[in-house]
Image (cartoon, rainbow, N blue to C red):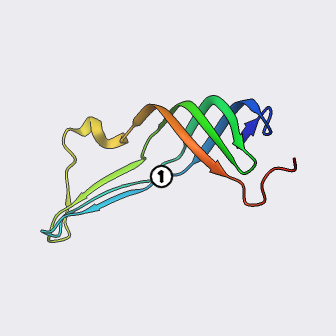
Amino acid sequence: MRVSSDADSVGFLTEINLGYRRFHALWSDGSELQLTNSPFEFRIGIGADIRIGRGFSLSPMATVGAGGFGTVKRIGPNGAKQAVDPPVDETGGHAWATLQLGGHFDIAGSKD
């Protein structure tokens, strides 16, 4: 969900995202890394919505987010499951903080 307090000039921008994530890597020797069963992934952002012209706006934003994988599997080239080292990595947790600048084009433009 993304909400701007004023989409026609300069507004306060907030964003809340919920999701599910999967990661799958395959190496040339046939071994794999699979991270699945992400029960909850979220991101929260605050920024500005700056209307530049009738059909374009810029959106600088700061975000923070976190998530985790419920299952981490390493599979060898022969298809056998391998131990995940160290065992503390079994949850596959991750978090981030970003500064971003987005550009948004309106298909129909504003109603000026």
Left or right for 20, reference 2? left
Residue 62, above or below 31:
above
Name the residue: 55% across, 43% down.
40
Q: Nearer the viewer, residue 64 or 91?
A: 64
Question: Residue 8: where, in percent of width, then height?
Answer: 80, 39
* Residue pictured at 53% horizontal, 37% vertical: 101
* Position of the N terminus by quadrant: top right
Residue pictured at 56% horizontal, 42% vertical: 102
Residue drawn at x 81%, y 50% is 110
Where 50 falls versus 18 (above or below)?
above
Side (left or right) of 111 relative to 40: right
Is 54 on the left-hand or right-hand side of 15? right
View extreme (right): residue: 112
**In x, y percent, where is residue 23?**
37, 56
In the rendered view, would you say 22 is above or below 5? below
At mark 1, the secondary structure is loop
The residue lying toward the viewer, choosing from 65 and 77, is 65
Across and down, in percent, residue 60 comes to 57, 33
> 83 or 111, which is in the foreground?
111
**Amino acid under label 1?**
Arg
Q: Quadrant of residue 77?
A: bottom left
Residue placed under numbered mark 1 in the picture: 21
Give the image location of residue 76, x and y in percent: 16, 64
Tally of numbered tags: 1
In the rendered image of this protein, does residue 57 appear above or below residue 80? Answer: above
Is residue 81 shown left or right of residue 44? Answer: left
Q: Nearer the viewer, residue 81 or 8?
A: 8
